[in-house]
Structures are given as structure tokens and as C-alpha cells.
Amino acid sequence: MAVVLVLLFASVGLLYALISTSATVHYMDELNQKLNRDLARNLVADRNLVAEGRIDQLALKETFAQYMVINPSIEIYLLDLSGKILAYSADPGKVKRNRVSLEPINEFIRQGGKMPLLGDDPRSHDRQKAFSVTQVPSTEHPEGYLYVVLRGEQYEAADKLARESFFLRLSGWSVAASLGFGLIAGLLIFRLLTRRLHRLSMLMDRFHQSDFSALPVYAESSRMLGDEVDRIGVNFEQMAVRIQDQLGQLKTQDSLRRRLVAQVSHDLRTPLTSLQGYLESLSIKGDSLTSEERDEYLGIALRQSRRLSQQLNELFELASLDARETEPHSEPFPLAELIQDVVQKYRLRAESQNIKMQMPSSGALPFVHADIGLTERVLENLIENAFTHTPEKGVISVLAEPVGDFISVSVRDNGKGIEAQDLQHIFEPFFQSGNSGQSRQHAGLGLAIARRITEMQGGRIFARSEPGEGATITFTLPLKKPVPVSG
């Protein structure tokens, strides 16, 4: 950018020199022509160049000679009506044209042209100069033109010397010094304006080289108000914070993924190994086993197969919920009826395990706005979890009651409860409470699935427990959306 600024100043200086030179030449031509507009006519009148209605050649030669001495800056030419040069005051060897164009001459005589009017210079094939002209011997009986070039050869020689004089050189140095000073000042100002951009660039480089770990600090205060550069710096600082946060989340998710893969591998390996072992035993010892032993081995293999199938189904279900492949189809329905149906489905199991199931009534309940199938899945997971932690002759209670714009459903057991340090983790995948009284017969995904489903339907789920007094897991669902009343 500094190089561009230098080139810009150089271009401005060159353009200024060209424009000033051209304007000066144009101004001098206009001024000279206006001052000497009637010079040719006065020459004819003052020098008595016309005698008896014709050009006096002897007087014309004397005029040439005298004006070469008196006013060497002009050159005088005698032209015929076609523009052919008949005589002149210039050196014979330097006249290169035989004739000059009549268009600027006629325009000058008509006095309709805008000055300066430039005519052909007889001493050049392509150059034009300011001039003065008149018809001779008279306007009524013209035989030709007296054509006066106002800036002749000697004028150009003197002009060249003047251009090389001390004054012009001083002017040139003054212009160069002014441009140099402007360039240096511009570079300093440019540096002052871009130092913050340079600092911001260094912060970006340092942030990149640190593998996005070194947090850049651009502004001392996040409320710092400034121009666009300051706003870019503050936005970059906020973006860097966001990048670090996202990188931290990615690392956490990657660590969780690795842990989940290891946990899944362990949980699936246990029933798979047991299933394989009993099947191999049946294959090797099949002929030596009694029918009771064979039935026992087949029963154990079947249970392990069902356990493996359940764990795989839960894994696929959780993955589907996390990927949003399963979306709730919410509709209004009576939650009390669904709870009664689900509790009734577990009556036989409760009787077989000598566990009492109860559903205390809290009065009539309004409709909820949720997915029936997914809500049933949540209830089943919570009741299955309660069965896991409820001892023989224990009690499982399911209570539903309205709370504001939601209905709260609580599933309570009277088992050993959950330790305080475990409460915040029980909804995480594969988490197993330390107070579980049974061996690991499930993958610890039921509560994680329940949380995903509840949050997808606009509710929330939480747990309360006191060690030795059981645990209560509660989830909420929104009430039926009100229908707008028309009219």
C-alpha cells in the first residue's frame, strides 16, 4: 500500500507538470494573439506596403529587414490567395512548407474563432502556432495575405533559454520539494492510520500460529467504541473466543465419543461372550448333556441374545434421536389414560417380583400436546428404571398433576436412592448409579433416551433423591395448545 501511495504521488506530480506546461503554453498563445491581433494590418498601413493598389516589393523587403532587428520574435510571410508562400522574413534554409492552410486564416479574418487560433508554421511540417493575418493590398481587392507568425525561431530560442534559467529550475525544485514533503507526510499519516491494522494482523498471525490456543486481546474493554478498524478488532476478539469455545466443545465431544465407543464395546461384549460360550458348550457337549442342562444352556443363551438385542435397539434409538431422524408428531391426548394403560401393562411383572404399583389420583387432568408413542416410551423407560432399583415388597408410584402450563409426571421408587454426586449424571448415556442392586443387565441408555424425547417435545426432566429413601424422576409435557376463538 505504501508503494501504491508513492506511485500515486509520482503520477500526480507528472500529471501536474504536463497540465501546467500545457496550460501555460495555451495561455501564452492566447495572450500573445490577443495583444497582436491587428499586427499584420498595422504593418501594411504603417510601412506603406501598398502603392498604387499593389504590393510594394521594395517596401516589403525593407520591412522584413527592419522587423528582423526590431522584433526578432515574429516572422512575416506573404501568401497568395491559395496559401502559397511568395516571400518571407525567415532564413530561407529553414522554411519547409510551400503553402499554409487557409482555414484558420479565413476564420481569423471572419473574427468568429475562439482564441487562440493556431495556423501552420512554415518552418515545420506538422507544428502550428498563433498568428496575425490581413488581406493585401486591400480587403476589397485582395491579391494575397500578410501572414505573421507571432512566435518565431528566435522567440523559441529565447524561450528555451528562459526555461533553463534559475527561476524555472527553482520552480521545478519547489514543486519537487512540495511533492516530496506531501509524500513523506502522507506516508506518516498512512502509518498512523494503518498501525491498528498491522497490530490486528499480528494478533491474527499469533492466534493462528498458536493453533488457536492463545486468546488475542485487541481492546481493553469490550464496550470500546471506535471506527471500523476498532469494530473489526473487537469482532475478531469475540470470534476468537467463539472459536476456542467451539474447539473445546469438539474436544469434549470427541472425548465423549471415544468413551462411548469403549463403553458400547464393553457392554456389547459381555452378552455376546456369554451367548457364544453357552452355544459353544452346547455344540461341544451336546451329546453328554442332560435335557435339563441343555434347556438351561438354551435359556441362558436366549436371555443373553435378548439382552444384546435390547442394547442394540437402545443404541440405534439414541443415535436416531441425537441425529434428529425421529421427530415428534404432537397432538392433544389424555395423558391420564396413557399412564393407566402403561401401568396396567406392568401389573403382572410387579406381582411376579412382589412389588406394589400404585397410581394416586390427582383429579381430572387436561389434555397434553405431545407425541403419544414417544411419551409412552418415556414412561416405560422410567418404570423399567424403577423396577431395577426397587427391592422385593417395594412400591412404585406414578403421579401426574398440572403445574402451570405443563403436566408433571413423577415415577417414584423406594429403593436405595441415588447418591448426590450421581444425580447430575444419571441422564448421561451408559451411566450406572453406584447404588444399583443388580448386575448390569442394561446399557444405561433408558434415562438418556427419556431426556432426549422429553426435550424434543418442549418439556424437561429431572431427578430428586435421598440415599436410603428411594428416588423420584419427573418429566413435564406442555398442555394442549389453545384454539383461537373466532368472532
Image (cartoon, helix red, strand yellow):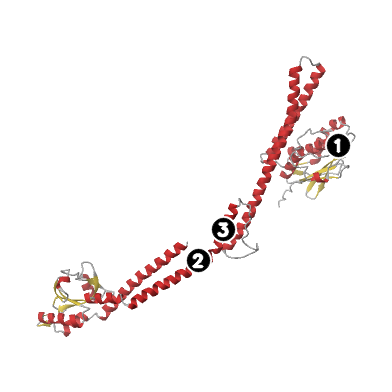
Secondary structure beneath disc 3? helix
Q: Amino acid at mark 1?
A: Thr
Task: Tell which circle, 1 or 2, labels the residue nearer the N-terminal end.
Answer: 2
Is 474 positioned to the left or the right of 18 in the image?
right
Secondary structure beneath disc 1? loop
**Pointer 3 residue:** 202
Q: Picture coordinates of residue 300 (x, y %)?
A: 79, 25
* Within-10-Å neighbours for mark 1: few <14, some 14–19, many 20+: many
Is 86 positioned to the left or the right of 432 in the image?
left
The residue mark sitting in front, 3 or 2, is 3
Q: Picture coordinates of residue 150 (x, y %)?
A: 23, 77
Which mark, by number, is residue 125? none
Q: Determine the residue located farthest toward the right in the rendered image.
A: 393
Which mark, by number, is residue 190? 2
Secondary structure beneath disc 2? helix
Q: Is residue 244 above or below residue 83?
A: above
Between marks 3 and 2, how big is the CA–CA gap?
A: 18 Å
**Pointer 1 residue:** 390
Residue at 78% in and 37% down: 381
Q: Is residue 157 above or below residue 348?
A: below
